[in-house]
Image: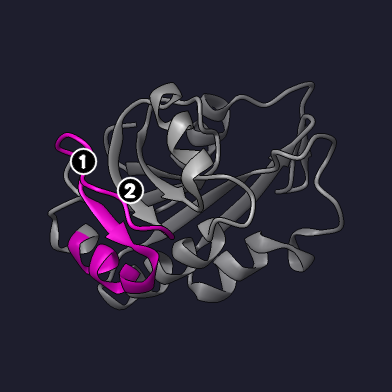
Amino acid sequence: MDRIKIFQIVGFQNSGKTTLLGKLIAYGKKQGFRIGTIKHHGHGGPPEGTIQQKDSKKHLTAGALISAVEGDGILQLATQNSLWNLKEIVSIYQAFPIDLLLIEGYKKENFSKFVLIRNENDLEHLKDLSNIKAIISWIPIASLSKIPVYSIHNCDAFVKDFFSGYLFEE
């Protein structure tokens, strides 16, 4: 897993994860990065519909070389297993020629992560997360320790900082 840089985008439903991921993918592609994505289907049960009808399609449209969604043991790359864990899915991505893997969801995993905060209630959940590299917030919040905080309304600054290396280096 050393050859591919891996980052997570996490937050609660409707916090802007997919939109932010699309911006990262589009900007990264323009910079010459080959990007893959994984989306966690966190609503229980298998993913609804096909990959062509969901957020993964947005990832592909933005320029990702490969994209998947997982839920209830179904990984939409037309593959099934009793239950997929993130390490198994990441190992599949190792076979693809990508530089960067962006994971939407899987809050409890320990990859470097960027957290979207939609409201005050979301702040209490930060203590349950590990390896937070930046926060992108819908509400004004003070800096937390040494974690940079970005406004969702200026997420272009976050995207540029990420690819300039300020946040990209693990």
Q: Which mark is residue 87?
A: none
Residue 59 in the figure: left or right of residue 154 = right
Q: Say which element carries label 1.
A: loop
Residue at position x 31%, y 29% from top? 131
What type is the residue that disc 2 sits on?
Ile
- Tell me where residue 72 appears, x and y as whole percent: 79, 31
Image quadrant containing the N terminus:
top left
Residue at position x 23%, y 69% from top? 157
Disc 2 marks which residue? Answer: 135
What type is the residue that disc 1 sits on?
Ile
Which is more toward the observer, 128 or 7?
A: 128
Residue at position x 80%, y 46% from top? 47
Which is more toward the observer, 26 or 159?
A: 159
Using the rendered image of the protein, determine whether residue 95 is visible from the camera's viewpoint: no
Q: Tell whether label 1 touches label 2 (CB within 8 Å).
A: yes
Identify whether 48 is placed above or below 130: below
What's the distance in space between the residues labelled 2 and 1, CA to CA? 7 Å
Is residue 49 highlighted in magenta? no
Residue 41 in the figure: left or right of residue 128 = right
Identify whether 152 is placed above or below 36: below
Residue at position x 53%, y 61% from top? 16
Q: Say which element carries label 2.
A: strand
The region drawn magenta spans: 138-161
Identify whether 7 is placed above or below 33: above
Quarter holding residue 55: bottom right
Crowding near pointer 1: few (<14 within 10 Å), some, many (20+)? Answer: few
Q: Residue 147 carries which label?
A: 1
- Tell me where residue 34 appears, x and y as whole percent: 37, 62
- Tell me where residue 123 appears, x and y as whole percent: 43, 38
Sequence-first disc among 2 and 1: 2
Q: How many labels does the image show?
A: 2
